[in-house]
Amino acid sequence: MRIKINRLKFIILTISILSFQSASCQEKYEQLPENKTDKTKIELASKITKSYFENLKNENHYDFKNEAIKEFKDKMTPDIQKQTYEQIKQKFGDFKSITYSGTWIKKDNDEFQIIRFKGDFERSEESLEIRVVINGSNKISGLWITLWNDNLNNS
């Protein structure tokens, strides 16, 4: 009888572990279908991203005003912008263009939309990803560059 109970405990423990592992591996983000994207957010992100990189390319900085939250503006000082662009430029060359790729949301918090662009740079053989995070008030709360990955959940 004791062996049967221990086996039962082992089976329950194994099932619990497998359930936990599958739950923790679930995708956190989902891409919105085109008909559910907010065109205003996409246009805002596109306009600011192009202007941001063009300014840096021309050895200026972008002056974030009402289009971004205060915490973001405080961190994106002219020096930080120029240092970051200089690192990108050394590795990938100057900015050329962006192409809209999609809008994603976090499954448990759809207040923020992640607008994804493929960024082309002079010496980069592959597109880089430029992500612009926009909150429910149409304010930028994040912007970063990373290597491109088709699925946001794999990056």
Image: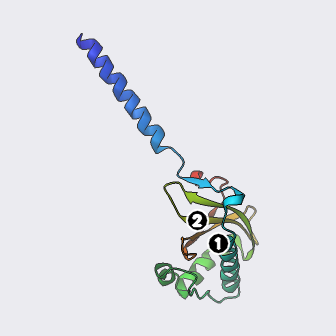
The residue tagged 1 is: 41
Q: Locate residue 83: give its quadrant.
A: bottom right
The one of 87 and 8 positioned closer to us in this rendering: 8
Say which residue appears at 67% left-offset and 88% top-offset.
59
Instruction: Describe the colour scheme in one phrase.
Output: rainbow
Say which residue appears at 43% left-offset and 33% top-offset.
18
Q: How many marks?
A: 2
Quadrant, the C terminus? bottom right
The one of 43 and 95 positioned closer to us in this rendering: 43
Say which residue appears at 38% left-offset and 28% top-offset.
14
User: Looking at numbered disc 2 in the image, what kind of residue is underneath it?
Assistant: Gln
| Residue 111 point in image, percent of width and height | 52, 65
User: Where 15 sits versus 38, above or below?
Assistant: above
* Secondary structure type for disc 2: strand
User: Looking at numbered disc 1 in the image, what kind of residue is underneath it?
Assistant: Lys
| Residue 137 point in image, percent of width and height | 54, 75
Quadrant, the N terminus? top left
Say which residue appears at 72% left-offset and 63% top-offset.
127
Q: Are marks 1 and 2 in contact (CB under 8 Å)?
A: yes
Residue 13 located left or right of residue 138? left
Classify mark 2: residues with Cα within 10 Å, few (<14), some (14-19) or many (20+).
many
The one of 44 and 56 positioned closer to us in this rendering: 44
The residue tagged 2 is: 113
Residue 29 located left or right of residue 32? left
* Secondary structure type for disc 1: helix
Marks 1 and 2, how far apart at CA: 8 Å
Q: Locate residue 42: give its quadrant.
A: bottom right
| Residue 73 point in image, percent of width and height | 51, 83
User: Where 104 sits versus 9, above or below?
Assistant: below
| Mark 1 or 2, nearer chain start | 1
Q: Residue furthest front?
A: 35
